[in-house]
Amino acid sequence: MNIFKRLFKIGEAEANSAIDNMEDPIKLTEQGIRDLKQDLDKNLEALAQVKALAIRAKNDQDEYLDKKEDYHNKAILILKKGERGEMDKTESDRLAREALVKKEEAQKHVERSEEEAKKFNENVAQLERNIQTIKSNISNWENELKTLKARVKVSNATKSLNKQMAEIDSSSTVSMLERMKEKVAQEEALAEAYGDIAGASKSIDDELEKAASSTEAKAEDDLSKLKDQLGLNEDKK
C-alpha cells in the first residue's frame, strides 16, 4: 500500500511531487496494482492463519468446558460415595476437593480460551475488512488503468501533433508563400508581355503584306479582260 500512499493521497506534498515527476504513469500504476495484489495475498494468508488460531481457541474453550463439567460431576459422585459409605468419607472429601480444584483450573482455561477466541475473531473481522478494501481498490484501479491508458494515448498523440505544429516556422512559411505569389505574378506579367509583342509583330507583317501584295489588283484586271471577251463589260460600250 505504500506506493499508493505516496501517489494518490491528494494534498500531501510528497504525493504531488511524485505525481509531477513520474515519467511513465502507466507503468507506475501497473506496479501499484501489483503491490496491492501482493498485499491481498499477504492478508489472505494472515486471515487463514488467524482463523486457524480462532478455531483452535474455540475448540480449547469447548474442551475445557467439558473438563469443567466432568470435574464437577466427579466431585458430586465422590461425595455421594462417601455419604453412602462406599468409600472413606475423609478420602472422598479429599478427592472431591481435588476435583473442584481441577474444575477451577478448567474454568480459568475456559476464560482464557474464550478471551483468545474473541481477540482472534476481532482480528479475523479486521482482516476481512482489509481484504474487501484491497479487492475494491484493485478493481477500481484496474478500471482506472484502462481509462488512463486511453487518456495517455490521446495525450501523446495530441502532444506529438502540437509539437510538430510548434516546430513549424510560421514566419518563414508566410514569407515563402509571398515569394511564390510574387513569382506567379511575375510569370503572368511576362506571359502577357510576350503576348503583346507577338500580337504587335503579327499586325505589322499583315499590313506590310497587304501593302506589297499585287494579287488583288491582278485579279481585278483578269476579271475585266474576261468580261471584255464575253461582251459583258458595259462600261466600255
Image (cartoon, helix red, strand yellow):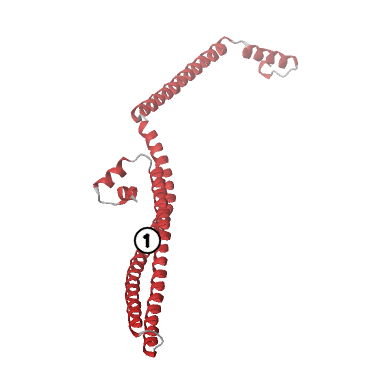
User: At 40% from the left edge and 37% from the top edge, which residue is drawn?
Assistant: 160
Q: Foreground: 65 or 163?
A: 65
Q: Is residue 144 visible?
A: no
The relative height of residue 37 versus residue 103 in the rendered view (above or below) is: above
The relative height of residue 48 versus residue 235 in the rendered view (above or below) is: below
x and y percent of residue 217 in the render?
A: 62, 12
Q: Quadrant of the C terminus?
A: top right
x and y percent of residue 135 in the render?
A: 41, 58
| Residue 98, picture quadrant | bottom left
x and y percent of residue 231 in the render?
A: 74, 17
Q: Foreground: 207 or 214?
A: 207
The relative height of residue 185 versus residue 33 in the rendered view (above or below) is: above
User: At 35% from the left edge and 69% from the top edge, which residue is drawn?
Assistant: 113
Label 1 secondary element: helix
For residue 220, side relative to residue 109 (left or right): right
Q: Residue furthest bottom?
A: 84
Q: How many marks?
A: 1
Amino acid residing under circle 1: Leu
The relative height of residue 209 versus residue 184 in the rendered view (above or below) is: above
Q: Which residue is mark 1?
A: 127
| Residue 80, picture quadrant | bottom left
Circle 1 residues within 10 Å: few <14, some 14–19, many ≥20: some
Q: Is residue 164 visible?
A: yes
